[in-house]
Amino acid sequence: MTASLIDTDLDDADPMGELVAGEHQIIHVPNTLRAKTGPGERVDPALVKEAEMAIQEMAGEFRVWALEDVAELRGILTECVEGNDELAGKREKIYDISHNVKGQGSTFGYTLLTSVADNLCNFLDSQDDLSLDHIPVLMAHMEALHAILRFDVKGSDDPTGQEIVRSLHELIGKKTVRASL
């Protein structure tokens, strides 16, 4: 018998090819990792330790960098609210800042920051165009990011942090419902 990625023996299926409740289908996936990584050498533990130390050294600087990103986001949104710039033309820059903060947050222990920035990225992904109607959602996320950094909130298990994320999800839900009406 030859191995295939999908077990085509559908004895466990009904006549329409659907699996019967309580039955299962076995999918065989070959392990090709060794072929991709090459033979035998393990990662040098000294190099791992060195990388961890570099991340720890940069962790203090991360807050400064992230606060600068959030300040840039605040500037963009302020310019748009004051009518000096079009929000639709700033979508990509807003997304880039959010994505950058999201990607680096967890690396430096700011999982709540990552959650909020991810929520903002998802909101931006769900919008074809941005308008001034979206400013409250964008500002709320920007303020949450700023507060997390200002008060140095690292974990996402904090009840206040969880409430912030829940409130942002709710705000997005309200904007989505209102936009579809």
Image (cartoon, rainbow, N blue to C red):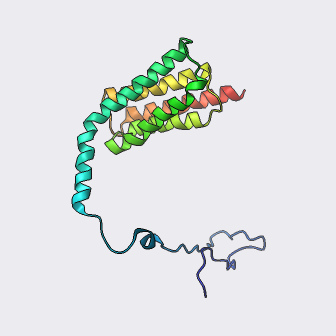
Find the residue positioned furthest to the bottom.
1
Does residue 122 appear left or right of residue 54 in this picture? right
**The C terminus - image quarter:** top right
Residue appearing at x 38%, y 31% in the figure: 160
Instruction: Work out whether 154 lies above or below 72.
Output: below
Instruction: Work out whether 48 lies above or below 87.
Output: below
Any part of residue 156 in sight = no
**The N terminus - image quarter:** bottom right
Does residue 89 appear left or right of residue 116 in this picture? right
Residue appearing at x 44%, y 32% in the figure: 163
**Percent position (x, y) of residue 175?**
61, 27
Any part of residue 58 in sight = yes
For the residue pair 19 and 132, the one nearer the viewer reads as: 132
**Percent position (x, y) of residue 2?**
60, 85
Residue appearing at x 61%, y 25% in the figure: 88
Find the residue positioned furthest to the right.
15
